[in-house]
Amino acid sequence: MEGQISTVLEFRLLGFSGNPQYQILLFIVFLVIYILTILGNFIIISVVTLEPRLHLPMYKFLKNLSFLEVCYISTIVPKMLANLLAERKSISFSGCMAQLFYFITLGATECYLLAAMAYDRYLAVCEPLHYIVAMTAESYTRLAVGSWITGIFTGFLPCLMVSRLHFCSCNLIDHFFCDISPLLKLSCSDTTVTEAVIFILSLLVLSSCFLLILVSYLLIILSILKIPSTSGKRMTFSTCSSHLMVVTIYYGTMISMYVRPTYRLSSELSKAVSVLYTVVTPLLNPVIYGLRNKGFKEALQKIVIRHHRLHAL
């Protein structure tokens, strides 16, 4: 039946626990996280836009990442919140495929953006004399736009292949959103080719980006070790530590989920790991960058003081 377009018109998302009390508690928790994530990332976008000192490639990449995190969490959480309160937790077939496409596209784009940010940090730390020449506005634009365009193309093939699977009469997805793994488990088609293609694509995207980041940071660490003073080492590493923390959390969860030849992870464990990279990671982005980046904190304080002065007049 491979190649037939499914006649299923909608899916039912089983989500989390069926206990109504837990549903309400989860709704409140995820709503608070969603609001904080949107607010935190918009603060980053606003501060980088308003403060001229932050009009540098590193902060422009950060602004891109914050915008991406807003889109990423908004692809999953609003529908999840609606289903937590709804008796019939459903999503249309077209809505499910659209959610899957945006989820894969934004996830891949984040991989490319994090790799571009690592390259930017490598140039800044290891090639400081050539940084201004190498990382021009044009270079930044090519890397940022290239990340988004490549992410869109990355999301197209898996979504197309999944959408052409046959789902027979069963439409119960044991997850809180339309992810690849539960959809492949649900299909009554032979998913061997689809699984192999998605596995190879995931491996290529995640491993290539992760390898670029790993090499960049190895070179950065070697360069930092050559700095004679302890304060100099600390100051140089502080410009990279925030990005390194985000990379570790994001790639750790993504590799554990998608760089596997089969999709046999237990549904509860799969849901728990999925919450980490769909809900928690977008929240950690503004927290990590806001608390650890000295330049950003100073710019935020400057804007707050300026705002208070204007209101005091």
Image: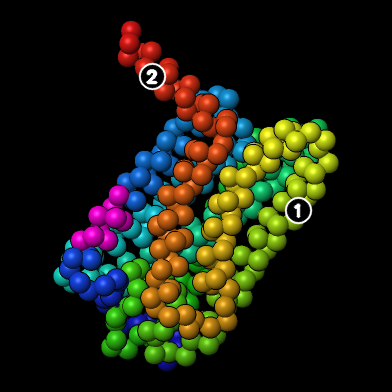
What span is in magenta? 24-32
- Numbered disc 1: secondary structure: helix
x%, y% of residue 196?
57, 82
Q: Is residue 193 visible to us here?
A: yes
Question: Residue 250 appears in which quarter of the rendering?
Answer: bottom right
Cα distance between the residues tagged 2 and 1: 41 Å
Crowding near the residue tagged with mark 2, few <14, some 14–19, many ≥20 C-alpha atoms within 10 Å? few
Image vertical order of residue 162 relative to residue 176, above or below: below
Q: Is residue 27 magenta?
A: yes
Image vertical order of residue 240 relative to residue 231, above or below: below
Q: Residue furthest front?
A: 230
Q: As rendered, which of 24 and 128 lies closer to the eye?
A: 24
Q: Quadrant of the N terminus?
A: bottom left
Q: Which mark is residue 9?
A: none
Identify residue for label 1: 218
Q: As rendered, which of 151 and 251 lies closer to the eye?
A: 251
x%, y% of residue 141?
61, 41
- Numbered disc 2: secondary structure: helix
The residue located at (48%, 77%) in the rendering is: 161
Identify residue for label 2: 307
The residue located at (30%, 49%) in the rendering is: 32
Mark 1 or mark 2, which is nearer the start of the sequence?
A: 1
The residue located at (46%, 37%) in the rendering is: 44
Q: Quadrant of the C terminus?
A: top left
Q: As rendered, which of 31 and 236 lies closer to the eye?
A: 236
Q: Is residue 50 visible to us here?
A: no
The residue located at (40%, 57%) in the rendering is: 279
Q: As rendered, which of 121 and 198 lies closer to the eye?
A: 121
Q: Is residue 72 magenta?
A: no
> In this rendering, would 94 be left or right of 214?
left
Which secondary structure type mostly characterizes the magenta part of the structure?
helix
The amino acid beneath tag 1 is: Leu
